[in-house]
Image (tube, rainbow, N blue to C red):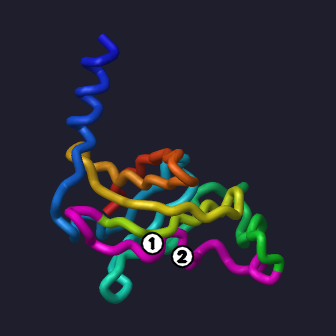
Amino acid sequence: MIPAFAALLALAFTPQADPQSVVGVWRTNDGNADVKVDRCGQKMCGTVLRILNPKAPKTDTQNPDASLRNRPMVGLVVLSGYQWKDGGWQGGKAYDAKSGKSYNSSIAVGKDGKLGVTGCVMFICQTRYWTRVK
């Protein structure tokens, strides 16, 4: 049963090969924010468009650089530097404002239509799935 479920999950999240498929507005996995993903020159990036949780901080309070903790969350770049390579957006950085940490990252849209944002530390990776808003 578990191998069948794993195979089904892998099929559902086979990345699409269209480089433009990641462009759009995406709701984060926790539902707290909408992020606009678009080209930044030849690379792809994502900027916080709106904060949906009224209890969420309005500024980047967890940033390890104290001089940046007053930056507004709306307009904050949380995905940056992704390059199209080998059929996917790779080599980027994902910033987690809740922890103030940045992770090596890749992004891809699966056949299920969700944006997989994968962050890695060393060889340990975790993927969060965002839902397209528009």
Q: Examine the structure image and report whether residue 121 is included in the region drawn in magenta.
A: no
Amino acid residing under circle 1: Gly
CB of mark 1 within 8 Å of CB of mark 2?
yes
Q: Residue at x 44, y 53 (%)?
A: 118
Farthest-out residue, front: 122
Q: Which residue is mark 2?
A: 77
Foreground residue, 129 or 64? 64
Using the numbered discs, state the Cα–Cα distance from disc 1 to disc 2 in whole angstroms: 6 Å
Farthest-out residue, bottom: 41
Quadrant of the drawing holding the N terminus: top left
Q: Residue at x 55, y 53 (%)?
A: 122
What element does badge 2 sit on? strand
| Mark seen at residue 63 | none
Q: Residue at x 32, y 68 (%)?
A: 24
Q: Residue 68's quadrant in the figure?
A: bottom right
- In the displayed structure, would residue 15 be above or below residue 11? below
Name the spot of residue 20 as percent of width and height, x first: 22, 70
